[in-house]
Image (cartoon, rainbow, N blue to C red):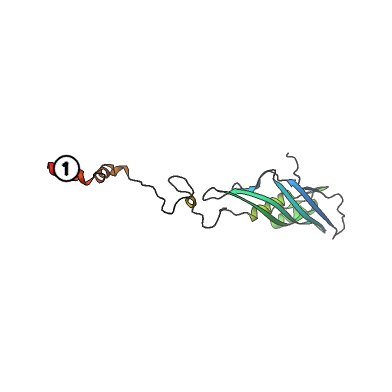
């Protein structure tokens, strides 16, 4: 069992009356795996969460914003991408006794309240992944990498190309390499 992240909120002091609220501010290091394989929040980078918990009849509604740093690579040119983002989330954490009925009805993952805690990490992870680009680009018209030399096409001169000759034509290519003097000498010998 992994150690709880810093995104676990103590709800012991949250009144059990419907409509009661609690404001929470967290400043914690990012847990591992917060994002996708291509882009996400680096583990340990700062995450700032401002949340309001509201008690409802069947659970606790969490409305929150999270300010975090995102790092990834452009899928075309592999240039580093770094930006700060604000992610918004709104999730209902169900009381454990009512969750089984909800899970059967909606056939989806249901977030549950612990006895004395509420874990924001799954909700933040879902909100962030939904907010991240599937194929991150440094800019929409990124030209990518040269397939021959691997350099970024945007960093190369406009006419960049490579001389590729099919090796099967190498004998004919040697004829093209002859100078006009070579041609005159060969005609004079004939």
**Residue sitting at x 20%, y 44%:** 181
- Looking at the image, which is closer to me, 123 or 78? 78
Quadrant position of residue 167: top left
Percent across and percent down for residue 187 are: 14, 45
Measuring from the top left, give residue 121's x and y in whole percent. 72, 48
Q: Is residue 142 visible?
A: yes
Residue 19 vertical position relative to residue 72 in the rendered view, above or below: below
- Residue furthest top in the image: 1
Left-right relation of 186 to 85: left
In the picture, which quadrant includes the C terminus?
A: top left
Residue 60 in view (yes/no): no
Label 1 crowd bin: few (<14), some (14–19), many (20+), radius 10 Å:
few
Q: At 39% across and 47% down in the image, what residue appears? A: 162
Q: Which quarter shows the N terminus? A: top right
Q: Position of residue 54 (x, y in %)?
A: 81, 58
| Residue 47 % position (x, y) | 72, 49
Q: Which residue is mark 1?
A: 185
């Amino acid at each position: 069992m992994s150690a709880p992240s810093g995104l676990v909120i103590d709800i012991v002091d949250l009144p059990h009356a419907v409509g009661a609220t609690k404001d929470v501010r967290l400043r914690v290091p990012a847990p591992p795996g917060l994002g996708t394989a291509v882009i996400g929040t680096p583990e340990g980078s700062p995450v700032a969460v401002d949340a309001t918990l509201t008690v409802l009849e069947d659970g606790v509604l969490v409305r929150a914003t999270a300010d975090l740093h995102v790092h990834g690579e452009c899928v075309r040119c592999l240039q580093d991408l770094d930006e700060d983002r604000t992610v918004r989330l709104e999730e209902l954490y169900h009381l454990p006794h009512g969750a089984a009925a909800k899970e059967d009805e909606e056939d989806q993952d249901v977030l549950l309240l612990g006895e004395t805690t509420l874990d924001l990490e799954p909700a933040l992870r879902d909100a962030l992944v939904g907010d991240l680009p599937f194929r991150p680009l440094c800019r929409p018209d990124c030209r990518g990498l040269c397939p021959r030399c691997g350099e970024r096409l945007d960093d190369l001169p406009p006419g960049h190309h490579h001389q590729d000759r099919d090796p099967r034509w190498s004998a004919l290519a040697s004829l093209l390499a002859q100078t006009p003097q070579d041609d005159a000498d060969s005609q004079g010998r004939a």
